[in-house]
C-alpha cells in the first residue's frame, strides 16, 4: 500500500521559499504531508511558507542549504538526517528536487565557475541528496525531479541549463529502474514558461506576454500551482503504476 496524505510522513521539497517549490510545498501540505522546506537565501520567505503550512493543520521544518558547492550540498544532507533522526516515527515519503537556477550566459560566454555552479545546483544536488537519503525513503515512496521543457526545445542561450535538465531526465528513468524493486517511483516534471521570479523580468513585459502566447498551444504562460498539481498527483496513490517518465507540462509548447 502507498501511504500518502496520512499526516504520518514527510515530504522534502528543495527550493521551497518561492515560485514552483513554494506551490508544491503548500499543495503537499494540503495533501496531508509534513514538510521539510529547503531554502538557500530567502529565510523570511520560507518562514512565511512554514506559517502558511501550519495554518493548514500540518507541520514544517526549515532547512538551509547552498547547492553551489559539494560542501554546501553535504551540509544540507547532514542537517536533513539530523531532523529525520529526531522524528523517526515520521519517515520520508517524497523528495521533490525543485531547487535550481539557470546560467545567465549563452554558448560562447560561459566560464568554468558558472558551468560548475549550474551543474552543482541542478544535477549534483539532486543526485547526492537522493543517494544519501534513499535509505530514509520508505518503500512505496516517490522521488520527483523538476526538469524543464528546454530538454525538448532548443534554446542556445540556455545551453548549460538545458544540459543539466537533460541529465536530470536521464536520472529519472535510470533511478526508477534502480528503485523499482522497493516500489519507490521516480518521476520527472518538465515545466514550460511558468510565472515566477525566474521569468518575471521578461515575462511581465508586453513582448514577453506575446512570446509566451505564441509558444504554447494554450496561448499563455503557466502558474506554479499547475506544476504543483502534477507533483501532487505523482506523489499520490493515483500514480501508483507510473515510474521513470518525464511529463511535459508546457501547455503544449512548440507543438
Ligand atoms: N519558472 C519557469 O519558467 C521554469 C520552467 C522550467 C523549469 N523550471 C524549474 O523549476 C524549478 C523552480 O523554478 P522557479 O521558477 O520556481 O525558480 P525561482 O522562483 O527562481 O526559485 C528558485 C528556488 O531554488 C532555490 N535555489 C536556487 N539556486 C539555488 C542554489 N544554488 N542552492 C540552493 N537553492 C537554490 C531558491 O532558494 P532561495 O530563494 O532561498 O535562495 C528558490 O527557492 C527550477 O529547477 C527551474 O529550473 C522553471
Image (cartoon, grey):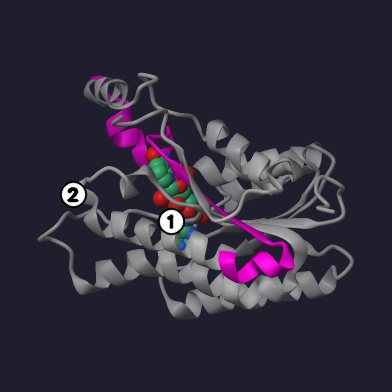
Which is more toward the observer, 79 or 140? 140
Image quadrant where residue 207 sits: top left
Q: Is mark 1 within 8 Å of ligand 1?
A: yes
Tell me the number on the disc at residue 40. Answer: none
Q: Is residue 84 left or right of residue 169?
A: right
38 in magenta? no
Check the image and report above or below for 121 versus 19.
Answer: below
Image quadrant where residue 69 sits: bottom left
Which residue is under mark 1?
A: 100
Which residue is under mark 2?
A: 157
Q: Secondary structure at mark 2?
A: helix
Q: Is residue 127 left or right of residue 96?
A: left
Mark with earlier residue (2, 1): 1
Q: Is residue 134 left or right of residue 15?
A: right
Extent of the magenta region: 177-206
Check the image and report above or below for 44 versus 175.
Answer: above
Q: Position of residue 241 (x, y in %)?
A: 68, 49
Which is more toward the observer, 225 or 94? 94
Question: Can residue 94 be spotted in the picture?
Answer: no
Check the image and report above or below for 109 versus 211.
Answer: below
Which is more toward the observer, 248 or 50? 248
Q: Position of residue 124 (x, y in %)?
A: 44, 71
Which is more toward the observer, 228 or 101? 228
Q: Position of residue 218 (x, y in %)?
A: 39, 20
Amino acid at each position: 500500500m502507498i501511504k500518502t496524505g496520512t499526516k504520518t510522513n514527510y515530504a522534502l521539497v528543495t527550493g521551497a521559499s518561492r515560485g514552483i517549490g513554494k506551490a508544491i510545498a503548500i499543495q503537499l501540505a494540503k495533501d496531508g504531508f509534513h514538510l521539510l522546506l529547503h531554502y538557500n537565501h530567502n529565510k523570511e520567505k520560507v518562514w512565511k511558507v512554514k506559517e502558511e503550512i501550519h495554518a493548514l493543520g500540518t507541520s514544517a521544518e526549515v532547512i538551509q542549504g547552498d547547492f553551489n558547492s559539494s560542501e554546501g550540498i553535504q551540509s544540507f544532507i547532514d542537517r536533513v538526517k539530523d531532523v529525520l533522526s529526531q522524528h523517526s516515527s515520521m519517515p520520508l515519503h517524497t523528495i521533490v528536487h525543485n531547487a535550481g537556477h539557470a546560467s545567465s550566459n549563452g554558448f560562447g560566454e560561459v566560464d568554468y565557475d558558472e558551468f560548475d555552479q549550474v551543474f552543482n545546483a541542478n544535477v549534483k544536488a539532486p543526485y547526492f541528496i537522493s543517494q544519501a537519503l534513499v535509505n530514509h525513503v520508505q518503500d512505496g515512496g516517490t522521488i520527483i525531479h523538476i526538469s524543464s521543457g528546454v530538454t525538448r526545445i532548443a534554446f542556445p542561450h540556455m545551453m548549460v541549463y538545458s544540459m543539466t535538465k537533460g541529465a536530470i531526465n536521464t536520472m529519472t528513468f535510470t533511478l526508477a529502474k534502480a528503485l523499482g524493486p522497493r516500489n519507490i517511483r521516480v518521476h520527472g516534471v518538465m515545466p514550460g514558461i511558468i510565472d515566477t521570479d525566474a521569468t518575471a523580468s521578461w515575462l511581465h513585459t508586453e513582448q514577453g506576454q506575446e512570446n509566451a502566447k505564441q509558444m504554447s498551444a494554450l496561448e499563455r504562460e503557466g502558474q506554479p500551482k499547475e506544476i504543483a498539481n502534477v507533483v501532487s498527483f505523482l506523489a499520490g496513490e493515483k500514480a501508483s503504476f507510473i515510474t521513470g517518465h518525464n511529463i511535459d507540462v508546457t501547455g503544449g509548447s512548440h507543438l
